Image (cartoon, rainbow, N blue to C red):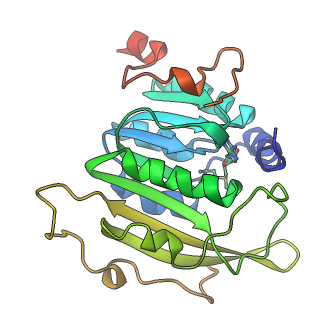
Amino acid sequence: MSRSVEFFDTQFKRQVQGGEFELNPFERVALAYLHGAVLDLGCGLGNLALEAARRGCTVTAIDASAAAIARIHGAAQEECLAVEPIEADLTRFNIGQEYDTIVAIGLLMFFPQSRALAMLRDIQAHVRPGGHAIVNVLIEGTTYMDMFTPGEYFVFRREELMDSFADWVIAVARYDDFPAPGNTLKVFSTVIARKANEKTLNVPEYPLVSEARPHITEAAARSAEPQSHGKHRVASQIPGPTLPLWIRNCV
Ligand SMILES: C[S@@+](CC[C@H](N)C(=O)[O-])C[C@H]1O[C@@H](n2cnc3c(N)ncnc32)[C@H](O)[C@@H]1O
C-alpha cells in the first residue's frame, strides 16, 4: 500500500468509527451532473457514489482503501443500492467501457505526471457523447504534502486541467483554496465538462464559465494490475452495467 493510500485508509477508519459520512464541497457541486452509468475513481468513503445510486444511477466505485470499500459494500447492501464497490490500485488500471459520468475527485495528483495525464485522457476517452467528466485535482500553490508518496505525485499547473477540456462544454470551472495543517495550503482546480455530441456541438446549454461558477481564488478558502482482495471484485473483472447480486435480490 502506498503512503497516500495508507494515509487515507487510516483517515477512513477513523471516519467510519465516528460515522462521518458528509459529502465534501466538490462532491456537493458534482451532484447535479450525475446521471446514468457512473464510474467513481478514487471514490474514498463512497459518499458521492452512494448518493448517486440513491438518485437512480448505476455506480461502479473504485478505490485502493480497504476500509473505504468495506464501508461502501456495507452501505450499498443495507440500502439496496446499485453500487459496485471495487478495491483496486488504479496505478495500472484502464477503463474498460464507456460511462455517462466519470468522476475523479481528488485522485489524479496521487500519481506521477505521466500516469496522472494518461488517466485524465482515459477518463475523457470513456465518457459517452453527451455525458460528463467531473475532475478535481491539486494544483500549483499547494504546500500541504503529508498525504503524498514522495516522488509519486503530480501537482497540476493552474490552467492545465481546464485546458485539457478544450473541446468540451464546460459546466463548472473553479479554483478553491483551503488552509491545511502546519499553516500550509491546498489549492484545487475543479472542472465539470460535458462531452459534445451532435446535438450539443456549438450549442452549449450552459452559460459561460465565468457566469456559471466564478473562479474562486486565493482568498476563497472558505469554503490493470489491480490487487485482488478476498470478496471484492478486481478491476480487470469489471463487467458491463450488470447489477450486483444483492441488488438483483432486492428488486
Ligand atoms: C483525496 S481522497 C478523495 C476521495 C473522494 N473522491 C472524495 O472526494 O472524498 C483520494 C482518494 O484516492 C485514493 N487513492 C489514492 N491513490 C490510489 C491508487 N493508487 N489506487 C486507488 N485509489 C487511490 C485514496 O484511497 C483516496 O480514497
Quadrant location, the N terminus:
top right
The x, y position of residue 202, in whole percent, is 15, 70
- Residue 205 x %, y %: 18, 68
In front of the other: 44 or 55 = 44
Residue lying at 39% horizontally and 13% vertically, measured from the top left:
248
Q: In the displayed structure, does residue 102 sit left or right of residue 217?
A: left
Quarter where residue 231 is shown: top right
For this view, does 74 lie left or right of residue 193?
right
User: Which residue occupies 62% across, 89% down?
Assistant: 219
Q: Nearer the viewer, residue 218 or 119?
A: 119
**Count the marks: how many?**
0
Relative to 67, residue 223 above or below: below
The quadrant holding residue 211 is bottom left
Vertical order, 40 against 120 (above or below)? above
Residue 106 showing in the rendered view:
no
- Asked whether residue 55 appears in the rendered view, the answer is yes
Q: Farthest residue in the right direction?
A: 182
